[in-house]
Image (cartoon, rainbow, N blue to C red):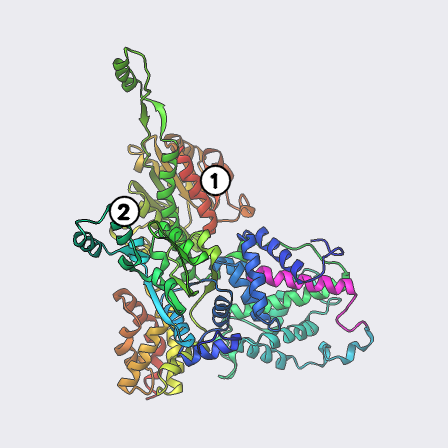
Amino acid sequence: MDALPASVDELTDGLRAAGYLPGSSTALVAYLAIRLGKPVLVEGPAGVGKTELAKALASCLGRELVRLQCYEGLDEAKALYEWNYRKQLLRIQAEADGASWSEVQDDIFGKEFLLARPLLSAISASSPVVLLIDEIDKTDQEFEAMLLEVLSDFQITIPELGRIEAISQPVVVLTSNNSRELTEALKRRCLYLWLDYPTLEHELEIVRLHAPELAETVARKLVGVIGMVRELDLKKPPSIAEAIDWARALLLLGARDIDEDTFAQTMSVIVKHRTDLEVVAARVGIALAPATPAQ
Amino acid sequence: MSLPPALPGIDARLLELGEELRAEGLAIGTSELLDAFAALEEIDWTERERFQSALAATLAKSPEGRRVFDLVFERFFFRAVEAAALREGVTERGGSREDDGRNGLDGSQLDLDELRAAIAQAMADFDEARLRDLARLAIAAFGRPDEASSGVVGVDVQRIRRALGLRSDPQPQFDPEDPRREGLGREALRHFEMLLRQELERAQIERTQTLAPARPLGDLDRALPSGPTADLAAVHRVVAQLRRRLATRGSELRGQRRHDHIDMRRTMRGSLQTGGVPVVIKQRPRRPRRPELYVLCDVSTSVTSASVFFLSVLHALHDSFRRMRSFVFIERVSEVTDVFAHERAFKAVSEAIAGEAGVADVSGYTDYGRVWSEFRVLVEDDLDPRATLIVLGDARTNGRDPRAAEFAALTARARRAFWLNPEPRLYWNYGDSVIAAYAPFCEVFECWTTRQLEDFVRSLTASAAA
């Protein structure tokens, strides 16, 4: 699908075909982002498919995905562009004699010597892309401020070259784990989507999509248990990805039911902290116990 | 919002909605509203959920904002519809009241058990439209405005809910298929109550032919759905933000008024270069003061719900302030600074406090008077005049002597004293609450939401830097 989707339902189908089951508002906001050309800020707990949404969008729109993974200390040189210093140096040395200063200067600050980093390559790509700016909350506020120019006008100003405007308008997805409050200015420029853990039915559908061989009853029970585990006060509640992993693990083990034993054996797939393991074993294991004598 | 001269058209409605959202504290600029209009052009409006989602995506930009948005959206369009209905003179029964008995909404013809089961089922299925219908049936069955009604909508809602036997705890007498056996979800129950409330209000508006003024959202509506773990996460998130704000805020103030005091000695020395004329005035750099904190936290049963909140506040404060000593008390006081120093995880801390502190000796009831005297003995020598004292508690003494004089003596030794009370201001000084006895000696803050906590910390850091 290279053309823009004409309706929300069309986009929903496209995302489904790409292996992503969007909730109703997810599809709607993604659709609006595409139609309005606005970036969309996706927030929510870890592992609810924020990054996956961008990937699925790219694949269903038939676009390339350009990803900028944010981290503390990320700066312009790594996000926007950098001068290829070594190449410049070589150039200067090659032309050491004869050339005047202004000629060399014009020469070495050309596009040829520019190393495009994700943001620049996203807006200067000849065909439109999907730009994913992942975990924006990990960066500092200065970086956010720098993003504003890119996000609202889709342009980048390089002092030596002038303004570079987008050749094609990318679909921009920003994700955040909400570990810090983002600035108002950034939020103002974005559409906002809050992704939470899916409802039971929705998650069941997702698990069934990714592990179709798993028996429906087992899948249903699995989703129920995951929901129970999420209710507990854990350091790291299990995400959708972990639910899928668990489903695959059960498939490999050939489990026909989730009883206390299978749960104890495979629990480490969904719970990843030692203290969490104890809590989950104590609370959920007991709740599952009645299933054992039935076997 | 005045009724009759309402401007026609959806544009005006949306602007009004924006106004109402602003009144509830959402930051909505013109650009957001423009986005909202642009978004509405892209979708069809036939589905309520899409309409709402599109507006939410452009107007509400945080989880909390989204929650407020949903509440205001619900309220606004309910009222807009009712206002329009009033203007047009439309009533529920198509204008004629004769066919009362035949339109199916009459309570006497209903099988009540069937109705109960149907509502429980619809709740379990999250079937919005069906729930709405059932809510009206339920009102028809139990809530005849002229008979048993109390006239207060909130009371009627609860009465109808009880009559329907809808409870969140498991009711094992039902069949395994019946959703009531496992207990109904709290969210679903709350949602159904909201529908009941709306239908009752609708009926009331129809009877009285007036629209009551909009009720602003209370803090309780606004708060994120509780459940202790969700609360805890929220507190931690806010406190983590506070910590960042504390750090930046301090430096902000330092930057603005870096030079306040003239350093006489250095100025005079400098003036020697210019023949004794102080041309260059040297100023004393401001040193940011490190607040020294003493925190007393009530962990008795009367503040159970708040003490998790308070302990997490304590926990977070420990991360921010190095020079801090914390104490917990019920009947006696016990220092827990070491516990916080050794344990990083909140869970471990609260367990250690519950297990080791040994603060409830005899009766398990708070004895503020005794706590003050003990605390004074404990810290008498250390409490220096620059220290800040913070008490977290409800000031409910269980009828014992508050010994305000002891407290006054304590606060006199400290530079500042704050009291954070986890009860809404409304309940202060009722029953055995003696907050008024302590209020003259400290600054009392109402603190039972993260927002109020934020306000408090802001005032704390602002005044510490001043």
What type is the residue that disc 2 sits on? Ser
The residue singled out by tag 1 in the image is B444
Q: Which residue is painted at 28% across and 59% down in the image?
A: A112
Q: Secondary structure at mark 1?
A: strand
Residue B374 visible somewhere in the drawing: no
Q: Is residue B38 left or right of residue A264?
A: right
Split into 4 quadrants, where in the image is the C terminus of chain B? Answer: top left
The residue singled out by tag 2 in the image is A102
Q: Residues within 10 Å of mark 2 (few under 14, many from 20)?
A: few
- The main secondary structure of the magenta stretch is helix
Q: Which residues are magenta?
A: B70-95
Residues B389 and B279: in front is B279
Q: Position of residue B448 (x, y in %)?
A: 47, 50
Residue A80 tag number: none
Subunit of label 1? B
Q: Position of residue B143 (x, y in %)?
A: 69, 69
Is residue A256 in the magenta section?
Answer: no
Q: Which residue is painted at 21% across and 57% down in the image?
A: A87
Q: What is the quadrant of residue B263 in the picture?
A: top left
Q: Position of residue B246 (x, y in %)?
A: 37, 43
Cα–Cα gap, marks 1 and 2: 70 Å
Is B130 situated above or below B314? below
